[in-house]
Amino acid sequence: MPESPRWLASKGRIEKADKVVTLLEKDAVKEGKALPEPVIRPLDPKATARSDWRELFKGMYLRRTLMIWVLWICAYMINNGLVTWLPTLYKQAFHLPLQTSLAYGWITSAVGVVASLVCALTIDKVGRKRWYQIAFLAGAVPLLTLTALGASTATQVVVLAPIAYAILQTIAFSLYLYSAELYPTRLRAVGTGFGSAWLRAASSLGPILVAFVVADVGIRYVFAVFAAVAVIGGITTLLFGIETKGKVLEELSP
């Protein structure tokens, strides 16, 4: 992929930036899109400023940074917890053959891929904030249903758990995109890097949480805990999420 023309321009590599923009314009024309006349704006000193990671925790970016961290943690704690634990659950709790347990685990991953493809084709039309609100809260429904049913059979789990995983995977899959949209060019790499670092912590915490909950109170309550985490993600998006649909980066991050 070509380098960001905004980044190239900020580094004084104007000729290279112009080549990238020209390439994008040619692709747009091939698709039959009209190109508006360019709008000349005065140069913002911030556009050429050096990045400083401390800016992530100042002004308008502090709220965005904390919000996106919560979304990374919630999405990956649930999904990595599920995808790691479910094959073991099928084998040890429901005494299914190893091949069957692995096949059921594969079903979870497969429906996640399908859901991610659907998300990729439609999230631009729906909007990030609306999609995440709906997905977090919708993902909690099958998890709560499993809690209510007691997660007492493999059939219940293999039907409902992959539904929750698929819905929440659309968030996990697209958080890299959303994180990048929340920061200006000078902070984009470090902001996305800080956020995605939390997915590593959450991915480790999910299976550990499962182990403690199963040992102390039982399988069904693992799904209750995951549902609570999903609700936290949904409420966080509702209260603090930034809608990026249809906005250029300069509007989002002045």
Image (cartoon, rainbow, N blue to C red):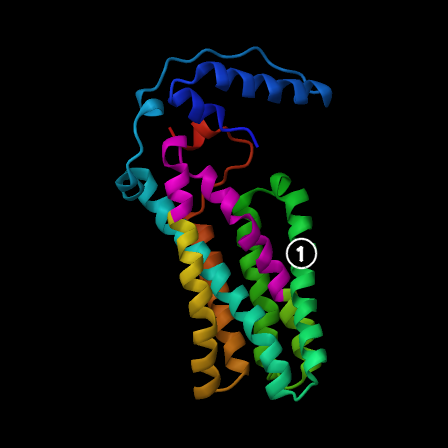
Residue 7 place in picture, x, y as percent: 43, 26
Secondary structure state at the residue bearing disc 1: helix
Residue 250 place in picture, x, y as percent: 43, 26
Residue 254 place in picture, x, y as percent: 37, 28
Does residue 5 lie above or below 82 as drawn?
A: above
Give the quarter of the image for residue 14. Answer: top left
Does residue 88 lie above or below 194 as drawn?
A: below
Residue 40 place in picture, x, y as percent: 46, 11
Instruction: Assess whether residue 190 is covered by the magenta stretch.
Output: yes
Residue at the image point whose x is 38% and y is 43% from the top: 191
Instruction: Assess whether residue 170 is covered by the magenta stretch.
Output: yes
Front one among 105 and 130: 105
Q: Quadrant of the N terminus?
A: top right
Residue at the image point whose x is 49% and y is 19% from the top: 17
Amino acid at the residue labelled 1? Val
Does residue 183 lie above or below 172 as drawn?
A: above
Residue behind mark 1: 113
Q: Is residue 54 left or right of residue 136?
A: left
Q: Which secondary structure dominates the residues rendered in magenta?
A: helix
Residue at the image point whose x is 52% and y is 15% from the top: 18
User: What segment is highlighted magenta in the picture?
Assistant: 164-193
Q: How many marks?
A: 1
Mark 1 crowd level (few <14, some 14–19, many ≥20, 10 Å Cα) = some
